Amino acid sequence: MDYDEVVQRFDPVLGLEVHVELSTNTKMFCGCENAFGGEPNTKVCPVCLGLPGSLPVVNGKAVESAIRIGLALNCDIAEWCRFARKNYFYPDMPKNFQTSQYDEPIAVNGWLDVVLDDGEVVRVEIERAHMEEDTGKSLHVGGSTGRIHGAEHSLLDYNRAGVPLIEIVTKPIVGTGARAPEVARAYVTALRDLLRALGVSDVRMDQGSLRCDANVSLMAKGAAEFGTRTETKNVNSLRSVERAVRYEMTRQAAVLANGGRVVQETRHFDESTGSTSSGRTKETAEDYRYFPEPDLVPVAPSREWVEELRATLPELPWERLKRIQTEWQLTDPELRDLVNAGAVELVAETVAAGAGPAEARSWWVSYLTQQANTRGVDLADLPITPVQLARVIALVAEGSLTNKLAREVVDGVLAGEGEPDQVVEARGLKVVSDDSALLAAVDEALAAQPDIAEKIRSGKVAAAGAIVGAVMKATKGQADAKRVRELVLSRCTG
């Protein structure tokens, strides 16, 4: 169904479940190394393989990270909580159950304010943040899609099994209307930035350390009860979160409009088509047969410890943005442009390297954003660093480069020609600052255009622009235009 018709006829309800792999040194319940990649099945032990007789031990650093995440999300931290066994059979879950938290999570009842592209603020309420362990990974070989359907065989890598996870679950998000997909993306973006600021995860969506399950349902306008939801699993990019929500809204609306019913199920998102496909019928809590984990003692963080951890919280992203706006003297639209371009950190690092905020911001949100768009990459993935850009800005400030030459230097860095000073040297881009050389070029231009020279001598100084342009062309843009103008006027009126 057309999206505009969807939002005219239905109200969307969202529920977002974000899984965050913690960057602890070891896994959640054993001493195996917690690191991405590696040879398959080399970072394993009897505990994370679920071998008989092995016993888990809780990772204290993971508990600390869970509490800090809960505090940053304005949650209440439980004085007593415990782990449970979530029973289900999957090949990548070697124990046939996942050690998680069920009815007694460590953090509950929080909220996170997210800012949309136009500055509107939406408060997303948090139901819970709980601790659990990640599963292993299945590699399906021989099929065209990389999924189990059509594969010839599957390989299992248990290196990821047991990696510490925090699952952050929102309460139902209602009232967002046509902006529901945008709200979903903005929420995951804000959560990613928060977790990065806390230093608890590298939040690499491309490596799976931050994954979003997007629950979507529709209810007819004026209805009082939520519709049947679907859960699109493991969406692994910010853009895909928005696309998956939008697609599910249009798909479910078409089903309902045709008299069908939405099936409660998990679905998979296809990056190439922007569509979802059916996975499996979604289980309920009863299907998992939760019961308290008998091999782990409850977790009971003291109030004193919780307050000590609260004191360790860094400047949070929204607080930092307010400070940056004040220090850099940005208007609200300028700050939004900076945020929407994904340039806040890049500008901050450029300023830290010695550049002025205005110059750094101008480069990143204009010329370099254009270059990123042309190349089809994110701004942060351009092959130029904030330190390199700060050097280019410094060369302009000291008069060694004009703005035009500076763009050529940046182009050289982007092309892999080396550091800014190396590009200047190799391309011969330094500003011509020798007055004798400039005077020679001025005299030549005046001699070539005697009528213009006469106008300047008669007091029409605006005509000097033509001579300045000729000198700039003769010097391949490497002259200081302001100095050239001074010399032209001196020659004609002195």
Image (tube, helix red, strand yellow):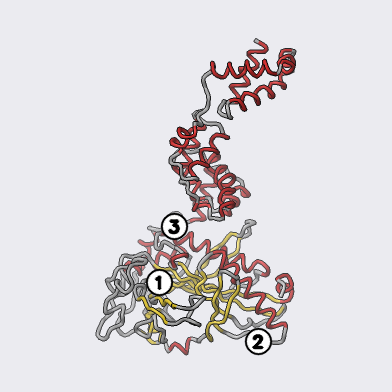
Q: The residue under label 1 is which amino acid type?
A: Leu
Q: Residue 167 is drawn in which quadrant?
A: bottom left
Q: The residue under label 2 is which amino acid type?
A: Arg
Q: Are the residues flagged by discs 2 and 3 in contact, CB closer than 8 Å?
A: no
- Residue 458, image x and y in percent? 75, 13
Q: Nearer the viewer, residue 65 or 301?
A: 65
How would you rate the neighbour count of disc 2 (Cα within 10 Å): few for under 14, some for 14-19, many for 20 or more?
some
Which residue position is annotated with label 1? 165
Q: Residue at x 65, y 19 (%)?
A: 445
- The disc placed on residue 261 is 2
Q: How far apart are the two marked residues, 3 and 1, measured between alpha carbons?
A: 17 Å
Q: Residue 269 is drawn in which quadrant?
A: bottom right
Q: Is 464 drawn above or below residue 145 in the view shown?
A: above
Residue 132 visible within the image: no
**First reached walking from the N terminus: tag 2 or tag 1:** 1
How would you rate the neighbour count of disc 1 (Cα within 10 Å): few for under 14, some for 14-19, many for 20 or more?
many
Q: Nearer the viewer, residue 165 or 234?
A: 234
- Residue 64, image x and y in percent? 35, 66
Q: Is 200 drawn above or below residue 336 in the view shown?
A: below
Which residue position is annotated with label 3? 197
Q: Is 319 drawn above or below residue 477 in the view shown?
A: below
- Residue 90, image x and y in percent? 41, 84
Q: Residue at x 50, y 50 (%)?
A: 382
- Residue 320, image x and y in percent? 49, 51
In the picture, which quadrant includes the N terminus? bottom right
- Indicate left or right for 166 with 296 as reference: right
Name the residue at the top extreme: 494
Q: Are the residues flagged by discs 2 and 1 in contact, CB closer than 8 Å?
A: no
Residue 470 visible within the image: yes
Q: Point out the frontmost of discs 3 and 1.
A: 1
Give SS at disc 3: helix
Q: Point out the frontmost of discs 2 and 1.
A: 2
